[in-house]
Image (spheres, rainbow, N blue to C red):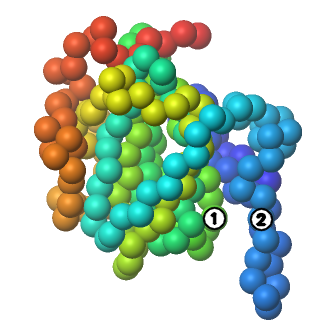
Amino acid sequence: MKVTETKLPGAVVVEPKVFGDERGFFMETWNQTRYEEVGLPPRFVQDNLSFSTRGVLRGLHFQNPDQQGKLVQVLQGEVFDVAVDIRVGSPTFGEWEGVILSSENKRQFYVPEGFAHGFLVTGDRSALFSYKCTARYNPSAEGFVLWNDPDFGIEWPVETPTTLSEKDQAARPLREIPVEQLPRYEP
């Protein structure tokens, strides 16, 4: 397994070992001991599966309280996946990292607790997106940051996604979200 750190502390790209031959391939998508050895949380409490068509953008989402760390991967298709540090007081506050995840490259991306997360389906077809979460979904704690917040300058591969949910359309830039609704940085 290869782990690559990003410019955002705690956000890492994981490339599991893939064993393939003429029959197909095999890979471990989670092994508590191995992932814990490279610094990922030892406990996930919820698994989610999302199916989206080409051009769909989901995000940028966060939860506070009940912050969720997410280990994400694409089982079918391709996405541009983004993490943004929105922890008040963090040295990397407002910075983002984007990673191409696909069924071909088999990469995983760990988005730490306290980060906003989103993805855009970029491949020629739909995407089946899987993620493990460190906390359960809490609808009363969910928050939304504008996907194209100009203060972030995220370099999305499209200017305008074809589909956004009503919640994502109504999202506000980070500077308009009351600071008490945002996660706090704890070194």
Q: Secondary structure at mark 2?
A: strand
Residue type at mark 2 is Met
Q: Secondary structure at mark 1?
A: loop
**Pointer 1: residues within 10 angstroms few (<14), some, or many (20+)?**
many
| Quarter in which the C terminus is drawn | top right
Quadrant of the rendered structure where residue 53 is?
bottom left
Q: Residue 2, can we see it?
A: no
Side of 177 where 74 appears, left or right: right
Residue receiving disc 2: 27
Mark 1 touches mark 2? (CB < 8 Å): yes
Residue type at mark 1 is Lys
Side of 166 where 99 appears, left or right: right
Residue at 41% across, 63% down? 51
What's the distance in space between the residues labelled 1 and 2, CA to CA? 9 Å
Q: Nearer the viewer, residue 9 or 36?
A: 36
Q: Nearer the viewer, residue 37 or 126?
A: 126
Residue receiving disc 1: 106
| Percent position of residue 35, x then y | 77, 41
